[in-house]
C-alpha cells in the first residue's frame, strides 16, 4: 500500500522567506507526482505535475523536485507572499491509476 | 486549462433525506471520474471510481447502497448520498483527467468540493 507523508504538518514564515515543503512516499513505483493547493473549504488547485521520468518542474515562483528512487519530493516557493497561505497537498499516481495523498502542509505567511 | 465543476458547493439537509452532488468536466471528456471524501485536517480518501456506462467501483468499507454513483455521460457523474445521517457530514470532492492525453501523463483536476451537513 502506498503511503504519503508530508512534513512539516504546519509552518509559519514571514513574508519574503522561501518555503520548503517535503513529501515522501513508500512505494517508488509511481507514474507521476502532483502538488496541489487547497484553500479552506475549497477544492484542490493543481500546481505542478512531475512525471516519474522527470526530476523537477517549475512554474513561476514554484519549483518541485522528484527523487523517485528515494521516494521524495520537495516543493519550493520562492519569496513567499501572504496569498501563498494555504494547505499544500502532495499526491502520487500509482498502481491501478490511483492517487494517494498526504495530509498536507498547512502554510501561513505572515505579512 | 481543464476544468471540473462540482455542484452544489454546500448543502444542508435533514437526517433521512437524500442529497445529489454533480460533477462535470467542462472542456474534456472523462470515462472515469473519482469521488473523494475529506475529513478536517486529513488527506483525501478515495470513495469510488465512477465509470461511464457501467457500475462504479467502490473502495473497501464504502457502502455502495448509501453512496449511489451514476456516470450517465462522458462529462457528468453524480453522487447521491441516500438516507443521510449526521455521520455522513463531510467534504466531498470529485476529480477527473483529460484522458485523451493518457491518464498517466495528465494532471488530475478537482471540483470545488461540496460541504454536506446533515442535521
Image (cartoon, coloured by chain):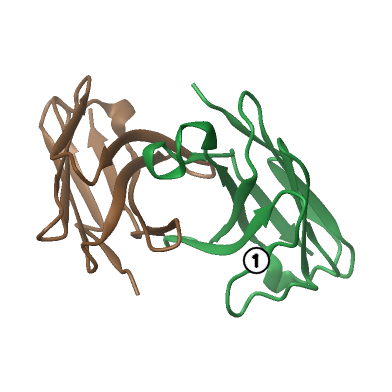
Q: Residue at x 70, y 62 (%)?
A: B56
Q: Which residue is mark 1?
A: B57
Q: Residue at x 56, y 42 (%)?
A: B96
- Secondary structure of residue under mark 1: strand
- Left or right position of A27 against B72: left
Q: Nearer the viewer, residue A67 or A21?
A: A67
- Left or right position of B21 against A59: right
Q: Please identify which colour was used for chain B in the image.
A: green
- Left or right position of B71 against A91: right
Q: Please identify which colour was used for chain A in the image.
A: brown
Residue A49 screen position, x and y as percent: 31, 37
Answer above or below: position of A45 versus A71. above
Q: Nearer the viewer, residue A29 or B86?
A: A29
- Left or right position of B113 against A90: right
Q: Quadrant of the C terminus of chain A?
A: top left
Extreme residue toward the bottom, this view: B61
Q: Is residue B39 visible?
A: no
Residue B57 screen position, x and y as percent: 65, 66
Answer above or below: position of B111 versus B79. above
Residue B12 screen position, x and y as percent: 78, 53
Answer above or below: position of B57 versus A72. below
Q: Residue at x 73, y 70 (%)?
A: B86
Tell me where residue A80 sits by quadrant.
top left
Residue B22 screen position, x and y as percent: 75, 43
Q: Is residue A34 visible?
A: yes
Q: Quadrant of the N terminus of chain A?
A: bottom left
Tell me where residue B17 sits by quadrant.
bottom right
Amino acid at each position: 500500500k502506498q503511503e504519503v507523508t508530508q512534513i512539516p504538518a504546519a509552518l509559519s514564515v514571514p513574508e519574503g522567506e522561501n518555503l520548503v515543503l517535503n513529501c515522501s512516499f513508500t512505494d517508488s513505483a509511481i507514474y507521476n507526482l502532483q502538488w496541489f493547493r487547497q484553500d479552506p473549504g475549497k477544492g484542490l488547485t493543481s500546481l505542478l505535475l512531475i512525471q516519474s521520468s522527470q526530476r523537477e518542474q517549475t512554474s513561476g515562483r514554484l519549483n518541485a523536485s522528484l527523487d523517485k528512487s528515494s521516494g521524495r519530493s520537495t516543493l519550493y516557493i520562492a519569496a513567499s507572499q501572504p496569498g501563498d497561505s494555504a494547505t499544500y497537498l502532495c499526491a502520487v499516481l500509482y498502481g491501478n491509476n490511483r492517487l494517494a495523498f498526504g495530509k498536507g502542509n498547512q502554510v501561513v505567511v505572515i505579512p | 486549462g481543464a476544468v471540473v465543476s462540482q455542484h452544489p458547493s454546500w448543502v444542508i439537509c435533514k437526517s433521512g433525506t437524500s442529497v445529489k452532488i454533480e460533477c462535470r468536466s467542462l472542456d474534456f471528456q472523462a470515462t472515469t471520474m473519482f469521488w473523494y471524501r475529506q475529513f478536517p485536517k486529513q488527506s483525501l480518501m478515495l470513495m469510488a471510481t465512477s465509470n461511464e456506462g457501467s457500475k462504479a467501483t467502490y473502495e473497501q468499507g464504502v457502502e455502495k447502497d448509501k453512496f449511489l454513483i451514476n456516470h450517465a455521460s462522458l462529462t457528468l457523474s453524480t453522487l447521491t448520498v441516500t438516507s443521510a445521517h449526521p455521520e455522513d457530514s463531510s467534504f466531498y470532492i470529485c476529480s477527473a483527467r483529460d484522458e485523451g492525453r493518457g491518464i498517466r501523463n495528465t494532471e488530475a483536476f478537482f471540483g470545488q468540493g461540496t460541504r454536506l451537513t446533515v442535521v
